[in-house]
Amino acid sequence: MRKWAAISTIPLCLALFGGSSLVQAGGSWTDFSPMPTARDELATASVNGIVYAIGGYAGNGCTPVGTVEAYDPTTNSWTTKTPMPTPRYGVRAAEVNGIIYAIGGGANCGTIYNIVEAYDPATDTWATKAPMPLGRVANAIGVIGGKIYVAGGDDAGGIPPYVGPVAIYDPSSDTWTLGASMPTPLDVTAGAGVGGLFYVVGGSDGVTCSNCTTMEVYDPGTDSWTTGAPMPTGRGYLSAASAGGLLYTLGGYVEPAGHASTVVESYDPATGTWSEQPSMLHPQSEFSAVVANGVLYAVGGQDNNSGSGVLLNVFEGLNFGAAVISVSPSSIAFGHEPVNHTSKTRQIAVSNTGTSQLHVGALSVIGANARDFAVNNNGCFSAVAPGQSCTISLTFHPSYTGERTGALQVPSDASNGLQSVPLSGTGTGICVRIVLGPHGEKICVGL
């Protein structure tokens, strides 16, 4: 929750649609492993299927955190990363070419930042970038054509009018430019880039509505704004994301009581219509939404429905489709191999028979004789499209005589989860014990 007092005289906005109805879409929500640090007003972004949760408030008064935690869907687990150098709440994040840019935000119940810091997941390091021309917090953000677009937000402690000009960041040159102003500057708003346009939706205008239905659309090609079809359910402190050519709006505060919501709606630019999507499992406001591997995630936030704001570590996802993994062969018997010799390479085909991209995690071999089996080539390091396959190559190098066993573990984000491929082989040769001390040493020679 914004830590300065809200303007109590703002009238409430209601969604009026003249009897039009929403279309119910498909998909289902699932709870995943909760985020380690409960917080609100955080930012999220995804790189290579990993979700990164950045900054926010964690229940320590007016002091935000720089905490960065990463979720891996292949293991359903979180890890802690290098914290953001400048702790911020109301910060927004976007990914371009594998780098996450944390933009703007605030601290100390009123300080507004124009800071930009870039996180490289490959090295777990942060770098300072050119600051925004105008500081802002709780704004909309989107990516179009490799550039980051920022619109709306607050720069004066919750006092309207809010920030009007759109700011455009080019990561390739580390430069900012200002574009046309929004017709209705919005605070505590959300947005995303869809089909070459930047959509900004919901929030508060500080005058006529605190949970607005407003949607405004920016065209980078003409540096101009137009008014879009209003969102069916007016909301502030909501979140938004794009997937499959649609704009998704999630959660936020709704009328009449200003409580956290589970509402999810999508907008189709091709038809100019809104559709109802399955509701979230938990009421969430002041949270962040992000898409990774065909799943729309809702991360953290606050639930004020009990009368006081409760910080959330909720991590739930709406699956638009699912990857399904299959492996062939289902087991490998390497046969007889001389001790300390390496076998011929055997291959396992990993196929995606589902409807969403498949991401294979880190491979490992477990079992009694795991060290006798090795992955010598992993062709499944990149996403596997539906209907496609990749190949994993293995070898057997027995260290002792007799039957040797192990199992290749193939984790993934597929709906059918971890695949285990039994491995076996027999080491041949002679083992003798050479007594060089009280216990001696066993030496095996392959024949």
Image (cartoon, helix red, strand yellow):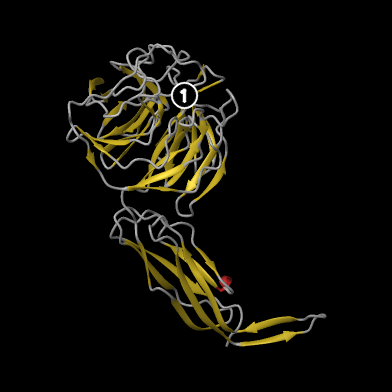
Q: Is residue 318 above or below residue 393?
A: above
Q: In the rendered image, which quarter is residue 186 located in?
A: top left
Q: Which is nearer the eye, 395 or 193?
A: 193
Q: Say if residue 96 shows up in the picture.
A: no
The C terminus lies in which quarter of the figure?
bottom right
Neighbor class of circle 1 (other Cα within 10 Å; few <14, some 14-19, many 20+) is many
Q: Amino acid at mark 1?
A: Gly
Position in image of residue 410 (x %, y %): 45, 63
In the rendered image, the vertical position of residue 31 relative to residue 157, given as above or below: below
Nearer to us in this view, 431 or 42 = 42
The answer to whether 447 is drawn above or below residue 125 in the figure is below
All told, the count of numbered labels is 1
Q: Position of residue 126 (x, y in %)?
A: 53, 34
Residue found 39% across the figure and 39% down from its top: 290
Left/right of residue 203 with respect to residue 309 in the rendered view: left
Question: Would you say residue 82 is visible in this rendering?
Answer: yes
> Secondary structure beneath disc 1?
loop
Quadrant of the rendered image containing residue 227 = top left
Residue 180 drawn at (x, y percent): 29, 17
Q: Which residue is mark 1?
A: 104
The residue lying at 30 percent from left, 17 percent from top is 182
In which image quadrant can residue 350 be found?
A: bottom left
Give whichever of 285, 8 is nearer the camera. 8
306 to the left or right of 191:
right
Residue 388 location, x and y as percent? 30, 60
Tell which residue pokes out farthest to the right in this image.
438
